[in-house]
Amino acid sequence: MIDRAIFESLQTKIDEEAAVRDELHDIVQNLARKGRSTQATLSRAHSTPAEQLKPVLEDATKEILAQKEEISRLRSVADKHPFYKYNGLWSRELQNLVSSVELCAWLGGLQEYKSSSSASFLTMEEVGKFLDIPVNLKEEDAFHLTLEEYLLALISMVEELARLAVNSVTLGDYDRPTQINQFIKDLFSGFQLLNLKNDILRKRSDGIKYSVKKVEDVVYDLSLRNLIPKGKSG
Amino acid sequence: MEPDTVRSTAGIKRSWDGLSLRNETRNSQPPTPTMAESALNVHSMFETFRDELDQHHDRRERLIKTSRDITALSKKIIFSLQRVRTANTPLPPSIAKDTKSRFTQILDLFRSTIPDITGLNNWRYQRQLSPGIQEFIEALSFNHYLTHQTLITRSEVAVHLPPEILVTEEDYVMGLFDLTGELMRFAVTSLSAGSHSQGQGQSGTEAEFDERNNQSGLPTLPPAQAGVVRDLREIRAEFESLSIPRRHGGMLRDYGKKSEVMQNSVEKVERAAYGILVRGSERPAGWKPDLSAGTEMEIY
């Protein structure tokens, strides 16, 4: 004898879960839409000389702050459910946002959230403070930025900076490729400390070496032709 | 590896020099911390990250291994249970002893995972443990069906597990899908076993039952076997009436495929029942149907 109630209660559970997913999905959609416009603004950095970057960074900061509001909406809904049950729904968009935050900070924006004005990127804790979310939780089951998400965001930022190194030269900035080179190498040596298994982090971090090479080639081309401004490189 | 590290460490030193210069010229900010200091920060930051990622990978691998062990034990239970010929009766003692000790081992394995899946980590590693849980549900629900001839509920499954182990709807549904495969094997073997005793004219209780219920004198299935066929048909109908939204995370991936396999299983049993009924008496004693074939192939 088959008890029909079993399948009825299954259907109820499935419907409840679908409702949660729909609610989260709507917020993530908004976050993604705003994320695309943040990224579009930040990509103007590729065609804007460093000294004219300020308005671009101001626009980007505004858009990032708009995304931050979506994050707090997301957080309030997600906190009602087990974190890792639905984490996959927003993980990608959160990474994109963190990567935008890091890029904006590297370009000279978001000064007030850096540990020191000279710092070129935000630590995970600083990102959390800026976005007003916990980071890297170990025990408590609540919304947060995970370590993997932070690292993946750094990798996206590195890829963007590799592109920027090439475009800086086109814009007549012969100084920036050297700065990018040093920064990327710094992060690259950090990633080399990690014991990565066959997962997404491994796959993505394998790509850093190509970014490093791309930037190294630019720096090599410039130094070979004595094009690097004096006193600014090692 | 080593020359690389040396080179990039050398690179770091220059990096902070370059960076501080840039910042001074552009933002006229106060001087930066020394280069070595900043490089050290990144280094120590990633060292903490490494330790955390190592712990994560260790937990993950431990759970994957446990899940595999649980799967293997569950499969052994299912093999033993396939030697049973009738549903809704207590298991034969030898088989009961066998499965009981394996269920105990499985419970111990589940208990051993608890430290790795507390708090936040409970859902974090759900996917690693899920294959084992599904196979366990398949074994447990098969065992339950053979002894009670009913479907085990999700809460009845949970009773057999430590409270920390999640019995998700996904795993439960997937376990039940696999159960239909086991019921198919069970139904077909018990159908053929039941039929040729009739064919040989050993008029047991089943044959008497036939005569009582069948004024027309036409062959019908013995009630025990008919029950399994009916149950499978009902399970199929219930599964088909479930509607799974497209955006349903884990369940969607396998649902279509598993559902097809389940429909095939039910159809095999229906054809087997038909074949046994109409042509069963013409089969030689001890003949068993070929279960490896698909439904399209005529197995009867």
Image (tube, rainbow, N blue to C red):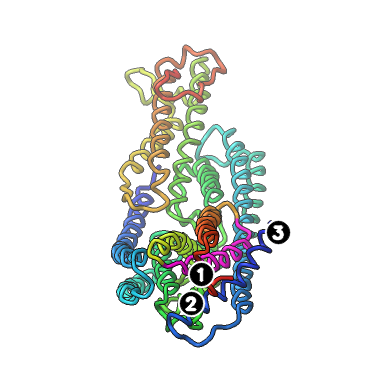
Question: x, y (%) of residue A5?
Answer: 35, 51
Q: Secondary structure at mark 2?
A: helix
Quickly name the residue at label 1: A179
Please state the horizontal and vertical placement of residue A86, each as a whole percent of the image: 41, 61
Amino acid carrying label 1: it is Gln
Mark 1 and mark 2 on one chain: no
Query: How many other residues sit within 10 Å of disc 1, few (<14), some (14-19) or many (≥20)?
Result: many
How far apart, in angstroms, are the residues tagged by discs 1 and 3?
A: 24 Å
For label 3, the residue is: B2
Q: Is residue B271 among what the camera can see?
A: yes
Q: Is residue B151 above or below residue B83?
A: below
Which stretch appears magenta? Answer: A173-196
Q: Describe the element under mark 3 as helix, strand or loop.
A: helix
Q: Which residue is mark 2?
A: B22
Tell me which corner region of the image, top left, top right, bottom left or bottom right, holds residue A51.
bottom left
Separation (CA) of disc 3 from disc 2? 30 Å
- The correct choice, above or below, for A75 with respect to A165 in the image is below
**Residue drawn at (53%, 20%) of the image:** B288
Give whichever of A186, A172 is nearer the camera: A172
